[in-house]
Amino acid sequence: MFNGLPTLMKYPDRSPFLCGPSGFTFDNCLRNKQLKENGLVEPKSFATGTTVVGIVFDGGVIIGADSKAAIGGMILSKTIRKIVELQSNIFAAGAGTARDTNALVELTRAQLELHRMNTGFRKVPVCCANQMIRQLLFRYNRNIDADMIIGGADSSGAHLFCTRSDGSTDTAPFASLGSGYLVSMSILESRWSEDLSEESACALACDAVAAGMKNDLSSGGQVSLCVVRCDFSVQWLDQLPRQVTPAHTYRLAPKAGCTTILSTMVHPVLPWRGASALCEPGGSQEPGPGPGTSGASRGQEVRRRSNSLDEPEAKRKKRGGR
């Protein structure tokens, strides 16, 4: 019991992944549910954002991320490092709730170290780290708000995994996550190729993160890059975002006369005083005299029509005079 509320710690036979000091525990969820039923107002949650990318090149893998930590409209830091080390050959970058991401990374790092010691201190495969993370995320059914990009190198080469909060995993040569992932993915899809060199891959990762930072208010700061090569060497690069130029530019410059005119329609524009009279085919704006109509009656009709059109103006003058 925790302050008179039921907890999950009364089940000693559960896995340490589910409860206990070495894993996740949801005691506070039961407590918060009881407090909400008692009338306590739930605090407002803030959305956070980030932009992380991963690229596989000829000789290794690169993970890039921005360096701004924001909660809603408040910026906490502009120099935070969002790329973490799981093993000496495996690195990851997360997007989502910072507390959930840090807890997931700490637990995975501990389990990977135990696995490394149990296997004779050999290099842990990258797929092993991805499998541990996806099992934890799938087990908690989206209660852990963390999307991860896992990259590294092992005896079989360089690998990159994109794992989301529901436990689904994609194995792709390039990936992007976070609130600015759509713009970053457009840069990656337009410029990635299988024979990328390390220098070109670094420039591509920097441009992809910079594009996400430019089009996302929750991303910013500088670009952090982690280069993991197949010879297990690691290099960290921190640089300011470069000016991103579009890969394709289309300038429309149509020439005069290139469009065929199919038909022409002319609409006459009549002045207001003659708007009531329809334009005759002969071009006269005054209606022709009907049969049996004299010139005097036609003049009276024209004066009566002009008086009716000028009546609003006369009323305005009369009111103004008063």
Image (spheres, rainbow, N blue to C red):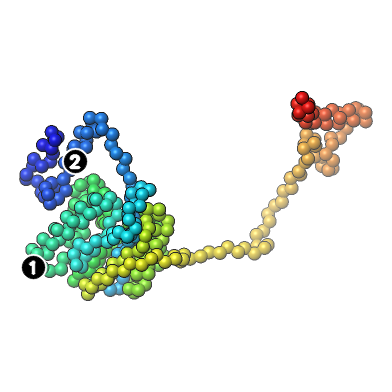
**Residue 255: x %, y % from top left:** 64, 64
- Compute the Cα span from label 1 to label 2: 39 Å
Q: In the picture provided, is 101 more to the left or to the right than 15?
A: right
What residue appears at the point 44 percent right and 66 percent down from the top-left corner? 243
Q: Nearer the viewer, residue 320 or 286?
A: 320
Residue 183 higher or lower than 157, as above or below: above
Tell me which label, 1 or 2, sits earlier in the chain.
Answer: 2
Q: What residue type is labelled 2?
A: Asn
Number of the label disc, if any, that sits on residue 105:
none
Q: Mark 1 points at which residue?
A: 120
Residue 28's disc number: 2
Q: Residue at x 80, y 37 (%)?
A: 274
Q: Quarter of the image containing the C terminus?
A: top right
Residue at coordinates 62% horizontally, 63% vertically from top-left? 254
In percent of width and height, residue 248 lies at 48, 66
Q: Which of 303 and 267 is in front in this view?
A: 303
Question: Picture coordinates of residue 297 (x, y %)?
Answer: 90, 27
Callout 1: helix, strand or loop? Answer: loop
Task: Please state which of residues 67 and 233 is positioned toward the viewer in this rendering.
Answer: 67
Query: Under tag 2, what secondary structure?
Result: helix
Name the image quarter holding residue 104. Answer: bottom left
Does the CB distance between marks 1 and 2 fall below 8 Å? no
Label 1 packing within 10 angstroms: few (<14), some (14-19), many (20+): few
Nearest the eye: 194 or 103: 103
**In the image, residue 110 lies at what x, y percent?**
14, 58
Q: Which residue is drawn at 84% across and 40% down?
A: 284
The 10 Å Cα crowd at callout 2, few under 14, some 14 to 19, many 20 or more, is few
